């Protein structure tokens, strides 16, 4: 029997970057749709605005660099970055917020490092952290889910709130059916724990249902479904997503068993905030993640541990962006010490 020996890399699928990006975007759309169901048209508006700015910024930079504009835009990497950032920010955030974030993601984080394949940090998460630190009020002004909201914004109200932020008071859309201003489940949990309340008392609030924030469970479930489709299609490897979710489950489980009055349950952590979005759509970015199978698993575990530690003991309710960026810094270190053994060589040689 004759064997054909070829040099690495060994690729069994002839898939273009644009095709991969398009499929990832399609897999994220169910999550975006569910997000719009619970939080209104704002998320869709933010995504469309971010995509428009991203394409213009990408074209302008490529023109300055005297590179092919059509080639850069047609790979859909800028569209995916804009999609993730638009999903992550509050639906009714003012228009200038998403523009600043998108410009920073594309021009600074992506293009100043040399473009696609050369950036050290995940562009969407780097932009998110910039906005969160610079504009904490706007970045934490999430509205109440439609099922428990006293007032839900329609398309016109969403457009006016985003593009004419002084035309109305956003706090109107943050009120629950009990007339109390609502925050995200993670923010509510952290704030009330600091006030001396127990988790059981917090979860009894109208904004929670079956131990998870109202609406957020279904949003995370939709992104989980999209992530599983990506795994099925071979768009991502299982190691990073499994590492993130397993580490977060174990850490939150240990904390919950030690003191259930001051620690959220594993179910709460897995289906709150941007957990599933991070595990399948953000942490799996092939450019900024570790490259070997064992390295990817370590990379994912590191993100899961950091998410829990920052959520539980840090100053920010949701720690996805910080965890991903810190893991991005560690990716070269992980790749250096966790390298696959060269075929034909013994371990250590």
Image (cartoon, grey):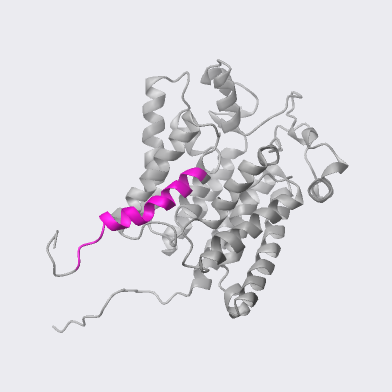
> Which residue is at 44% across, 56% downward?
284
User: In this view of the protein, which residue sits in the foreground, 170 or 62?
Assistant: 62
Residue 326 among magenta residues = yes
Name the quadrant containing residue 233: bottom left
- 79 is higher (above) or lower (below) than 245: below
Name the quadrant containing residue 172: top right
Residue 200 among magenta residues = no
Can residue 124 be seen in this snapshot?
Answer: yes
> Which residue is at 69% across, 43% downward?
39
User: In this view of the protein, which residue sits in the foreground, 309 or 204?
Assistant: 309
Q: Chief secondary structure of the magenta span?
A: helix
> Which residue is at 52% across, 46% downward?
321
Apparent side of residue 347 relative to residue 54 in the rendered image (left or right): left
Q: Position of residue 329 (x, y in %)?
A: 42, 51
> Which quadrant would the C terminus be assigned to in this image?
bottom left
- 167 is higher (above) or lower (below) than 80: above
> Which residue is at 57% across, 23% downward?
203
Q: Position of residue 167 (x, y in %)?
A: 87, 43
Which residue of the protein is positioned furthest toward the top in this rendering?
196
- 332 is higher (above) or lower (below) than 149: below
Q: Position of residue 300 (x, y in %)?
A: 38, 48
User: In this view of the protein, which residue sits in the foreground, 56 or 229?
Assistant: 56
User: In this view of the protein, which residue sits in the foreground, 106 or 236?
Assistant: 106
- Specify the segment rendered in magenta: 322-342
> Which quadrant would the N terminus be assigned to in this image?
bottom left
- 3 is higher (above) or lower (below) than 254: below
């Amino acid at each position: 029997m004759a064997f054909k020996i070829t040099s690495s890399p060994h690729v069994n699928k002839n898939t273009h970057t644009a095709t991969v990006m398009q499929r990832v975007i399609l897999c994220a759309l169910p999550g975006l749709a569910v997000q719009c169901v619970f939080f209104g048209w704002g998320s869709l508006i933010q995504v469309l605005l971010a995509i428009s700015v991203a394409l213009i910024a990408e074209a302008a930079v490529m023109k300055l660099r005297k590179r092919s504009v059509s080639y850069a835009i047609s790979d859909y990497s800028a569209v995916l970055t804009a999609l993730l950032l638009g999903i992550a920010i509050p639906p009714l955030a003012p228009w200038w917020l998403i523009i600043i974030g998108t410009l920073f993601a594309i021009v600074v984080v992506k293009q100043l490092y040399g473009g696609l394949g050369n950036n050290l940090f995940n562009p969407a998460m780097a932009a998110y952290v910039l906005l969160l630190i610079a504009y904490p009020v706007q970045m934490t002004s999430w509205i109440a889910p439609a099922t428990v909201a006293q007032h839900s914004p329609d398309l016109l109200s969403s457009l006016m709130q985003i593009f004419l932020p002084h035309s109305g008071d956003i706090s109107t859309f943050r009120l629950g059916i009990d007339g109390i201003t609502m925050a995200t489940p993670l923010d509510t949990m952290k704030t009330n724990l600091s006030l001396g309340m127990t988790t059981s008392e917090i979860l009894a609030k109208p904004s929670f249902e079956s131990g998870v924030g109202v609406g957020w469970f279904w949003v995370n479930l939709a992104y989980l479904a999209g992530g599983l489709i990506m795994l099925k299609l071979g768009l991502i490897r299982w190691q990073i997503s499994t590492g993130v979710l397993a580490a977060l489950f174990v850490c939150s489980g240990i904390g919950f068993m030690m003191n259930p009055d001051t620690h959220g349950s594993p179910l709460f952590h897995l289906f709150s905030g941007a957990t599933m979005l991070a595990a399948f759509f953000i942490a799996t970015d092939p450019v900024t993640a570790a490259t070997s199978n064992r390295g990817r698993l370590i990379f994912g575990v590191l993100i899961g541990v950091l998410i829990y530690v920052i959520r539980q003991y840090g100053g920010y309710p949701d720690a996805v962006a910080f965890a991903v960026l810190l893991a991005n810094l560690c990716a070269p270190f992980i790749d250096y010490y966790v390298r696959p053994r060269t075929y034909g060589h013994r371990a250590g040689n």
